[in-house]
Image (cartoon, rainbow, N blue to C red):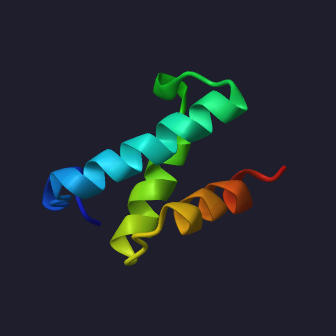
Amino acid sequence: MMQKSDIAIPPKDLNMLQSVLDAWCTQQRILRKDATAEAKILINEYQRGCRSQIALIDALINSTTH
């Protein structure tokens, strides 16, 4: 099990992940501090090699369709 501290995300990619999360939160009308599940999904997708904003958003859509 990896600890969060083991993940080295370059600032450019971190900014991209944050902007995807911010856009998602705005669209879904949720507070960013309440989007921990979404943040984990984004980090997991990033670790799997996903670097596309569209693919990251798709991952969020697919994971949260109730």
User: Is 61 left or right of 24, judged from the image as shown?
Assistant: right
What residue sits 63% from the left and 25% below the top?
30
Between 44 and 55, the one nearer to me in the picture: 55
User: Is 14 left or right of 5, judged from the image as shown?
Assistant: right
Q: Position of residue 44 (x, y in %)?
A: 42, 64
What residue sits 22% from the left and 54% below the top?
12
Q: Position of residue 62 (x, y in %)?
A: 72, 62
Q: Position of residue 13 (x, y in %)?
A: 28, 57
What residue sits 55% from the left and 21% below the top?
31
What residue sits 62% from the left and 55% below the top?
60
In this rendering, the count of numbered labels is 0
User: Is 19 left or right of 56, judged from the image as shown?
Assistant: left
Q: Position of residue 49 (x, y in %)?
A: 37, 78
15 shown above or below 51:
above
Q: Residue furthest right?
A: 66
Between 18 and 1, the one nearer to me in the picture: 18
41 shown above or below 36:
below
User: Is 48 left or right of 21, judged from the image as shown?
Assistant: left
Determine which quarter of the picture holds residue 57.
bottom right
Q: Residue furthest bottom?
A: 49
If the image is split into quadrants, where does the N terminus sit?
Answer: bottom left
